[in-house]
Amino acid sequence: MKKPLVAVALAALFATSATAQGGLRTAVFAGGCFWSIEKAFEAAPGVVSAVSGYSGGRMPEPVYPSHEGHLEAVKVTYDPTKTSYAKLTEYFFRNIDPTDAGGQICDRGHSYTTAIFVSGAQERAVAEAAKARVAGLLKKKVATAIRPAMQFWEAEAYHQDFAKHNPEHYERYRVGCGRDRRISAVWASR
């Protein structure tokens, strides 16, 4: 009886290790309210998951609403055989107003400012190049910061997949905020 359980446990461990070693990568983006950026990235080709959370601050284990210093962010897990960090960075810019230095749309303040958290020189080069392209396209200064990766703290369970679990509430927020209207205006004909 123990042998089948051990075999099942070993098979599960191997499957988990194979998935973890299967080449999936992560990237962290702050794009205003994490509900909206999480929803956007969940629809992106090659994305395996998007998790809402906090990054960029010094407070350990931040919680909503007292997450001083942190930005609302999303950790994106993606399959690099189906998309690239460069494509995700471009996708990120197309789902925010990169010229807004005071937050995003109706969400104001430091915790709603935009940033790309980079892990290493290669990601920094990709993010900086994307930021320069966006500035050229929009013919405006891009407020999105390129910051070194810091610890990512997962947000509370009720924030995860908020748009899926609370579609009416989320749509009222999104329409009331004017997010789609503003992002369409920023990126019109570009």
Image: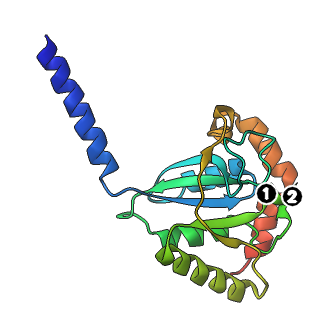
Amino acid bearing label 2: Gly
Q: Which residue is mark 2?
A: 109
CA neighbours of label 2 inside 10 A, class few (<14), some (14 to 19), many (20+): few
In space, the residues marked 1 and 2 are separated at their CA atoms by 6 Å
Q: Horizontal placement of 17 versus 170: left or right?
A: left
Res 112 label? 1
Q: Horizontal placement of 71 versus 80: left or right?
A: right
Q: Residue at x 23, y 39 (%)?
A: 14
Question: Residue 55 at x, y = what percent?
Answer: 66, 54
Q: Residue at x 80, y 72 (%)?
A: 185
Question: Residue 115 at x, y = what percent?
Answer: 68, 66
> Nearest the camera: 39 or 77?
77
Q: Count the marks.
A: 2
Secondary structure, mark 1, is helix
Q: Horizontal placement of 2 versus 102: left or right?
A: left
13, above or below 184, in the image = above
Pointer 1 and pointer 2: residues touching (CB < 8 Å)?
yes
The image quadrant that residue 92 belongs to is bottom right
